[in-house]
Image (tube, rainbow, N blue to C red):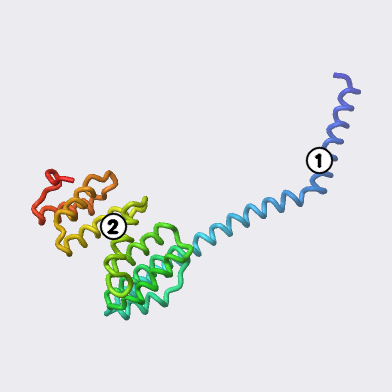
Amino acid sequence: MSDTDSFIDEVSEEVRRDKLYAAMRKYGWIAVVVVLALVGGTAFREYKIASNNLIAQKTGDAISEAIALEGPEARANALSEISANDKNAAVIALLKAAEQVAGQEFMASLQTLEAVEASKASLAYRELALFKKLLVEEGWLSEEARVVSLNDLAKSASPYALFAQEQLALIDLANGRKEAAINRLSQVMEDANLSQSLRQRVSQLMVILGETPETAEL
C-alpha cells in the first residue's frame, strides 16, 4: 500500500470517528434515557412485587387473627374490617358469610353473598357465592324456589353443578323421596368431572341408603 493510500485511510478513519463522536454528543442522551428507563422500570417492578407480597401477608395475618376469635359474630365483625383487593375481598366476604350463617344471621349472610355476586371478582367466586346462597335455607327462598335454582345450576357448566345435584338429592331424602335421591346420586357418580371428596361423600350416602356405587341403577 502506498503512502498516499495509507494517508487517505487515516483521514477517512478520523472523519468516521469525528462523525461518531458528533452523533454521540447529539443523540447520546437518548441512550442514557433508555438505560435509566430500563433500570427504573426494573426497580419499580421489584418494588411492586415486594409491596404486593407485603400487602398479601398483612391480609393473611388479619384473616388468621379474625377467624381465631371466639364466636361467629366477633369473627364476622373482624372480617368486615379487613380491606383488600377484589380477589381477597371476595374470599374474605365468603368467610364472613359463613360466620354469619353460623351466628344465624341469615339475611346478613345473604346480603354479603349478593355483594360478592355483584362485585368484579372472578366468575368462580361469584358462582360460589350463588351456590352458597342456595344453601341458606332460612330467610331467602322457599324450598320450591331453591329446588328450581339448584336444578338450573345442576344443568349448567358451573363447577358447582355436581354439588347442586348433591343438594337436590339431600332435599329429596328430606322429603321421603328415596328413589329420586338414589337416582340423582347415581348420576353424580357417573360424571367424569366428579372430585374425589364428592365421590367419597356420595358413595357413603348411597351405602347408607342400601345401595352401592357399583350396583345402583340410574
- The local crowd at label 2, few if under 14, some if 14 to 19, many if 20 or more residues have their Cα within 10 Å, is many
- Of circles 2 and 1, the one toward us is 2
Where residue 149 appears, as percent x and y from the top left, is: 33, 61
User: 40 or 192: nearer the eye?
Assistant: 192
| Label 1 residue SS | helix
> Could you tell which of marks 2 and 1 lies nearer the N-terminus?
1
Q: Amino acid at mark 1?
A: Leu
Residue 20 shows which numbered tag? 1
| Label 2 residue SS | helix
Most extreme residue toward the left is 210
User: 124 or 153: nearer the eye?
Assistant: 153
- Is residue 16 toward the left or the right of residue 128 in the image? right
Where residue 78 appears, as percent x and y from the top left, is: 37, 78
Residue beneath the point at 62% across and 54% down: 39
The N terminus, quarter of image: top right
Residue beneath the point at 28% across and 74% down: 138
Quarter-of-image position of residue 3: top right
Where residue 169 appears, as percent x and y from the top left, is: 21, 57
Instruction: State how far apart marks 2 and 1 are (Cα).
Output: 74 Å
Most extreme residue toward the front is 144
Where residue 125 appears, as percent x and y from the top left, is: 40, 61
Residue 100 in sight: no
Quarter-of-image position of residue 151: bottom left
Most extreme residue toward the top is 1
The residue wearing badge 2 is: 164
Q: Amino acid at mark 2?
A: Ala
